[in-house]
Structure formats: C-alpha cells, structure tokens
Amino acid sequence: MKKVKINKDLCIGCGSCIAEAQNSMEFDSDGKANCIAEMDDNIAESIKNNCPVNAIEIG
C-alpha cells in the first residue's frame, strides 16, 4: 500500500486521480485533490503517471 502526497501548488483540480482512486482521494475545500487513505501500489503509480501537471508524489 502506498501513501500519496499532492503538491497543492501544482494541482489544478482536474479530478483524474479522484476518478481512478475514489476510495482514497477526494477534493479539498479549495477544489484540489486530497489523499485520505493509502492505496494499492498499481493505482498510486497510475494516478501519478496520469496527472497532467505532475502534482502527485508517492512516498
């Protein structure tokens, strides 16, 4: 299981990560992605690779 961190300065709130990891991600009050739970390694890598602004870090 991986913990994902969102760089809020880069995030544009497109929602692609939230659509793919619905149980682990949500929008915060600023409309940006927020990780609320660890997720499967494959999903974490996928949302990182699909982020259009490279705002997702895995650690």
Image (tube, rainbow, N blue to C red):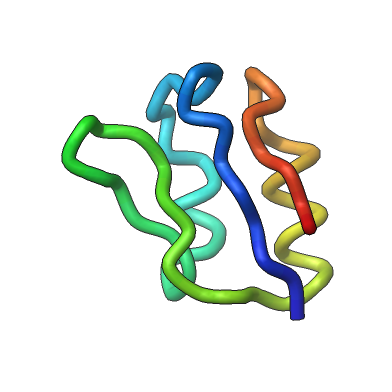
Instruction: Determine the residue positioned at 56% across, 41% down.
Output: 6
- Image spot of residue 4 (x, y percent): 65, 57
Looking at the image, which residue sits at the far left? Answer: 29
Q: Is residue 34 left or right of residue 5?
A: left
> Which quarter of the picture shows residue 56?
top right
Instruction: Determine the residue positioned at 68% across, 48% down.
Output: 47
Q: In this view, does 36 lie to the left or right of 41?
A: left
Above or below, 48 relative to 19: above
> Which quarter of the picture shows residue 59?
bottom right
Q: Is residue 23 left or right of residue 44?
A: left
Instruction: Determine the residue positioned at 48% across, 70% down.
Output: 24
- Image spot of residue 28 (x, y percent): 26, 45
Q: Nearer the viewer, residue 45 or 29?
A: 29
> Which quarter of the picture shows residue 32?
top left
Above or below, 33 relative to 3: above
Q: Which of 16 and 28 is in front in this view?
A: 28
- Image spot of residue 10 (x, y percent): 55, 18
Query: How many numbered circles are shown?
Result: 0
